Each structure stands twice: as C-alpha cells, then as structure tokens.
Amino acid sequence: MAKTCIEPGCSKNQFGGGFCAYHQFKRRLRGGDLFKPAKAKKKIPLESKKRKKEHIRYIEQVKMFEKEMQEKGKFYCYICGGDFNQSTIDYCKNIHHTQGRVGDYYLDKDFWMLAHNKCHLELHNLPIDELRKKPHWDDFLARLKLDYPDAYKKILKQIEKDSELF
C-alpha cells in the first residue's frame, strides 16, 4: 500500500520527501532539498596544463623559425610567394602546419611553413576548386611537391575527390 502525505489532513500518495505533489512547497519551508541552487560548474580550461607548457615553447620556436627562414632567404609566404612587408592584418605572418597540430607535429619545425594570414585562411576554408583558380596555385603545388611530398599527396587526393563529385 502506498504511503500517504505527511501533511495533516492530506490523504494523497507521497510524491517525494514525504509530501504529495500538491504539498511539495513545504519541503522548502522545512529546509529540505527542493529548490536548492545548482552547484556552480567548473569551467573547462581552453588548454590543458601540458599544452600550456608546449605553447610557451611553441612561441619561442616560432620566433627562431622566422629568424632561420630569414637567414636561409626563404622569408616569404609559402602559399602565394609574396613578402611580409605589407602592414595589413591579412598579410601578417602565420605558421601553417602541413601535418596538423596534433601530437609531436605541433613543435616539429620540419612540417612548418610561413604564410600570410589571408593565404592560410584561404587554404583551410576555400573549396579546392576555388583554390585551383588562384594565380599562385601551380607555383604553390610545385614548391609543395619538392619540400613536403606528404602534404602534396594529400592535396592531390582532395583534387581527385573533387573531380569525382562532378
């Protein structure tokens, strides 16, 4: 048999905390658990502790990488071949990771290339058929084939996929 509400004179079945659904507000008056404020959720950090340490090293290595490229005479945008003398935000320096930023590739300079911010965003966000229309595309592929053959093969696969769709 179901238990009845503990409120005097009420014969309804208990809903929770000894009270029926109608008398649930009395749980709050008795200092019960009804209407307790939710616990504050911990904010999830944007970077892990390990990644924060890596990021500090990464910033130092980027500066060193830029100096090395200047010394080698390769201080230009790898994608379009332009220089970094223009002062707009679209033409500021950016590092493109040919193998992604996951794991050991994040700090491995062998898979980095300098690029304008604008060119870098275009490479990641534009569809491959629009990239192929850019005037610097063929030169970029030639440079990529010589220096980063894995990245070159990856782009060729994207081009093949794109041509299969149409």
Image (cartoon, rainbow, N blue to C red):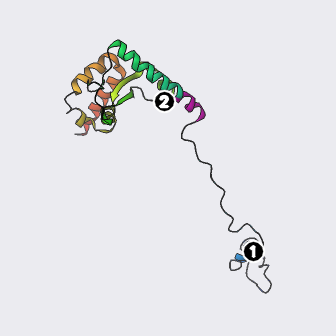
- Image quarter for residue 136? top left
Range of magenta residues:
46-55
Q: Residue at x 40, y 15 (%)?
A: 68
> What residue is at 78 percent from the left and 76 percent from the top?
3
Dot 1 and dot 2 residues touching (CB under 8 Å): no
Say which label, 1 or 2, has the lower sequence index: 1
In x, y percent, where is residue 74?
32, 17
Residue type at tag 1: Leu
Say which of 151 and 3 sits in front. Answer: 151
Which quadrant, please, contains the N terminus?
bottom right
Is the C terminus in the top left, top right, bottom left or bottom right quadrant? top left
- Residue bearing the label numbered 2: 102
Among the 4 quarters of the image, the one containing residue 139: top left
Is 127 inside the magenta-drawn segment? Answer: no
Residue 107 visible? The answer is no
The furthest residue to the bottom: 9
Residue 91 location (% of width, % of height): 30, 32
Position of residue 80 measured from the top left corner of the image (x, y, whole percent): 26, 27
Please say whether residue 35 is visible from this viewpoint. Answer: yes
Three-letter amino acid code at disc 2?
A: Val
Secondary structure predominantly adopted by residues drawn in magenta: helix
Name the residue rendered at 47%, 24% in the picture.
105
